[in-house]
Image (tube, rainbow, N blue to C red):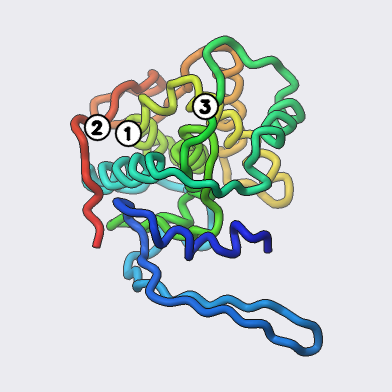
């Protein structure tokens, strides 16, 4: 494993204001035979709640996400984005994103879509790495500097087979996802998932929704939000964000 993922959980121990397990202890050694193999062990605080999508990245049905859960998620990703780091993951670098977008879409980006590099993001944020009904964000091997909005975009795209839940995520992060960098992050996340699901059977409804999202963004249109959020009609764009500033309620 590359150095950054190898040390990801330990490096994340210094992050604050985020709903995640705390690192209690770690140890590292080398097993010598039959060939030298490095081994790492980490002890974290116990998380009682199950992952939202156990054993998978993608939702197949709606979740009942409470306002508290959504507020804690927003507060956690805001707190993460504001904490500087020098960590970079090789598969999440700008040049790889350029090649990815060209290979999957082969279309120029319209005006109003442009990455803002330098935000600190969870780079593997999907429904197998968040718990419910109480939020904990898991799996901190892959995090570091990236385009602003990448974590929210990845979580949103992995929810598109459950449009009601996707609409809740978009509403919570509308100011992020509808901005120039957020729209770029959505295109990157959608392309990455489309490439990934080429290796196995996709969640029903996911790929058409990803193509619909990408087509709209590449046409310079708002992200098509489907499903029913609170007070939102079907198939209309959802705007807005949870009011006020939140502190993540985590212990």
Neighbourhood count class around disc 3 (C-alpha, 10 Å): few under 14, some 14–19, many 20 upward: some
Give the numbered dot on residue 180.
Answer: none
Callout 3: SS: loop
Residue at which label 2 appears: 242
Give the spatial CA distance, label 3 vs label 1.
20 Å
Query: Does the CB distance between marks 1 and 2 fall below 8 Å?
Result: yes
Identified at 28% across, 57% down, the residue is: 134
Direction from residue 247 to residue 3 in the image, left or right: right
For residue 116, the mark is: 3
Query: Where the C terminus falls, by quadrant?
Result: bottom left
Instruction: Estimate the x, y position of residue 72 in percent, counting from the top left.
Output: 27, 47
For this rendering, which residue is in front, 214 or 3? 3
> Gap between marks 1 and 2, in whole Å?
6 Å
Q: Residues within 10 Å of mark 2 (few under 14, many from 20)?
A: some
Q: Residues within 10 Å of mark 1 (few under 14, many from 20)?
A: many
Q: Which residue is mark 1?
A: 172
Q: Which of the two discs, 3 and 1, labels the residue nearer the N terminus?
A: 3
Left or right of residue 159: residue 208: right
Q: Is residue 202 above or below residue 152?
A: below
Give the image quarter of residue 193.
top right
Q: Are marks 3 and 1 in contact (CB under 8 Å)?
A: no
- Give the mark nearer the N terminus: 2 vs 3: 3
Q: Position of residue 106 (x, y in %)?
A: 75, 21
Kindly identify the residue that appears in the image at 32 percent across and 53 percent down.
Answer: 16
Query: Which of label 3 and label 1 is nearer to you?
Result: 3
- For label 2, the SS is loop
């Amino acid at each position: 494993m590359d150095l950054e993922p190898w040390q990801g959980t330990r490096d994340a121990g210094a992050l604050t204001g985020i709903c995640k397990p705390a690192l209690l202890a770690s140890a590292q050694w080398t097993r010598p035979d039959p060939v030298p193999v490095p081994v790492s062990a980490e002890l974290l605080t116990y998380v009682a709640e199950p992952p939202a999508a156990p054993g998978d990245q993608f939702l197949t049905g709606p979740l009942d996400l409470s306002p508290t859960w959504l507020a804690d998620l927003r507060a956690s990703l805001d707190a993460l984005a504001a904490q500087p780091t020098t960590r970079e993951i090789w598969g999440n670098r700008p040049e790889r994103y350029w090649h990815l977008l060209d290979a999957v879409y082969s279309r120029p980006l319209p005006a109003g879509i442009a990455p803002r590099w330098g935000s600190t993001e969870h780079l593997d944020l999907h429904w197998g790495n968040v718990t419910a009904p109480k939020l904990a964000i898991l799996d901190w091997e892959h995090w570091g500097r990236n385009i602003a909005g990448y974590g929210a975009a990845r979580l949103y795209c992995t929810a598109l087979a459950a449009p009601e839940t996707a609409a809740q995520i978009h509403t919570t992060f509308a100011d992020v996802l509808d901005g120039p960098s957020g729209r770029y992050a959505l295109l990157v996340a959608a392309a990455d998932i489309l490439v990934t699901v080429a290796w196995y059977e996709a969640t029903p409804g996911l790929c058409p929704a990803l193509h619909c999202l990408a087509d709209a963004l590449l046409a310079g249109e708002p992200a098509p939000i489907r499903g029913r959020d609170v007070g939102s009609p079907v198939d209309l764009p959802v705007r807005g964000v949870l009011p006020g500033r939140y502190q993540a309620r985590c212990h």
